Amino acid sequence: MIKTILPALAFGLSAIASAALPAAPAHAEDQKAEQFHIRGSIVAYSGSALTVKTREGETVDVTLADGWKLASVANAAVTDIKPGDFVGIASLPSEGGGDGALEVLIFPPAMKGAGEGSYGWDLKPNSSMTNATVADAVKGVDGRTVTVSYHGKEKKIAIPDGTPVVTIAPATKDDLVPGAVVFIPAEKAASGPLAHQVLVGKNDVVPPM
């Protein structure tokens, strides 16, 4: 769930495929120091300006770049994850070894390969993000554990009960209302945060990444 994390949250159908938006993180080596993630609730939106109260309690004014993209997320389930799917999983190391998922994003087929890799993530301390393909049927989805592959490597991630599982969904500017939860991959600019993509929560489903 671009070089920033939302590369092509492309919408539904053909629109989904063409709109490149939030959700897929990039390779660690591709991420630039001036890029960061904003998580919080909308205070106000107008034209190319979005004011957000972050989860840290700070209020920030985000400038929306020309041609910025917008998307949302819809609920999915662990049983929707199939071998061959491309997924983005934020996870933490488990006490017993391996990783435990914090959230799972099932990418639309048009976004397969976006941000492929496994790298540090800022959802929680010590968390990582893995964008990878679900392995074959034999070792792919086994109970609540999924094996994924990326760049010739494999990783097994447990998916605990209650883990948010979502997929990309359409959104419109009418969804940018006060109180709506957003996830924004932003760049540091002289005027403040600059965003090319915004992922907004709607229908009681919020971006979990």
Image (tube, rainbow, N blue to C red):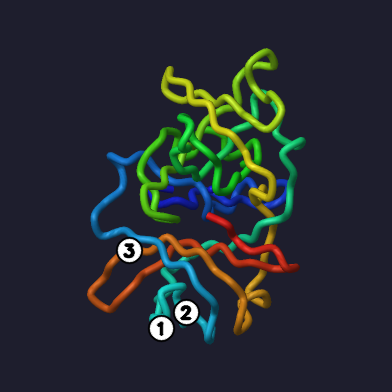
Q: Residue at x 69, y 45 (%)?
A: 161
> Which amino acid, mark 3?
Glu
Q: Position of residue 108 (x, y in %)?
A: 65, 41
State left or right for residue 57 relative to residue 76: left
Q: Residue at x 28, y 67 (%)?
A: 188
> Which amino acid, mark 1?
Thr
Q: Is residue 202 above or below residue 150?
A: below
Q: Which residue is mark 2?
A: 52
Picture mark count: 3
State left or right for residue 195 relative to residue 111: left
Circle 3 residues within 10 Å: few <14, some 14–19, many ≥20: many
> Which amino acid, mark 2?
Val
How far apart are labels 3 and 1 at the CA level? 16 Å
Circle 2 residues within 10 Å: few <14, some 14–19, many ≥20: many
Discs 2, 1 touching: Cβ within 8 Å: yes
Q: Residue at x 67, y 65 (%)?
A: 171
How far apart are labels 2 and 1 at the CA level? 6 Å
Which mark is first along the chain, 2 or 3?
2
Q: Which mark is residue 59?
A: 1
Q: Position of residue 28 (x, y in %)?
A: 32, 41
Discs 3, 1 touching: Cβ within 8 Å: no
SS at mark 3? strand
Which mark is first along the chain, 1 or 3?
1
SS at mark 1? strand
Q: Position of residue 84 (x, y in %)?
A: 64, 24
Q: Position of residue 18 (x, y in %)?
A: 60, 49
Q: Is residue 63 above or below residue 23?
A: below
How far apart are labels 3 and 2 at the CA level? 15 Å
Q: Nearer the viewer, mark 3 or mark 2?
A: 2
Q: Which residue is mark 3?
A: 187
SS at mark 2? strand
Which mark is first along the chain, 1 or 2?
2
